[in-house]
Amino acid sequence: MASEPAKNEDTKTVYESSNSHRRSFETPPTSSGERSLFRYWISEEARGAGASFSSPRKGDAGFDLRAATSLLIAPGEQTLVPTGLFCAIPIGWVGIVKDRSSVALQGIHTHAGVIDASYRGEVKIVMVNRSSEAFLVEAGTKIAQMVVVPHLEDAEQVSSVEELGQSVRGCGGFGSTGR
């Protein structure tokens, strides 16, 4: 059973149960002032292996994602790394999985990183080893980060490209801003 909401140093409302693997927090207010609750759970097996989901410090955008199991990624290999994390991202928000700079510096990168609000399965990270050496992922190691951001839910199709309107950039694409 959840305890009373407590304010942390960021003034986000944090709800903690007696089990530290179950937490939730309110997202920043939308333009209309509404807040949505983000909730998550870490599996017992993953917690036993040292996996967790760390809330960012004030000013940090990404939540650290940790490996739930140990595995070796060979050079050139792509693999799916379980995190033991299950979450309920609020409607109108999306989790974007990105590289951790310290891991990317070693040639290990993430792929396919969109966690939709409707998804309730385990968050798994597609990782690829672009280095020339095998990379050991140890259980509990921070392997990626998730940034939770608002997104558009509706789109309007127009009948011509002119209806999109003009912009200063126009059609300028690759290299259009110079070198």
Image: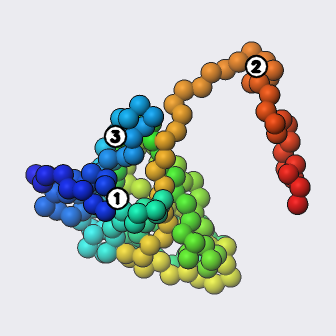
Helix, strand or loop for disc 3: loop
Q: Position of residue 34 (x, y in %)?
A: 35, 35
> Is residue 39 or residue 130 the one in the foreground?
39
How far apart marks 3 and 2 lie (CA) works out to: 34 Å
Q: Amino acid at mark 1?
A: Asp
Disc 3 marks a residue whose amino acid type is Ser
Left or right for 164, reference 39? right
Quadrant housing the C terminus: bottom right
- Can you say whether 138 is above or below 121 in the image? below
- CA gap between label 2 and label 1 equals 42 Å
Task: Identify the secondary structure beneath mark 2.
Answer: helix
Left/right placement of residue 25 relative to residue 149 reads left
| Of the image marks 1 and 3, the number of the one nearer the N terminus | 1
Residue 21 in sight in this render: yes
Task: Say which mark, if any, is on residue 36.
Answer: 3
For residue 10, the mark is 1
The image shows residue 41, relative to residue 102, as above or below, that is above
Q: Residue at x 60, y 67 (%)?
A: 109
Is residue 127 shown above or below 162?
Answer: below
Q: State the count of labels.
A: 3
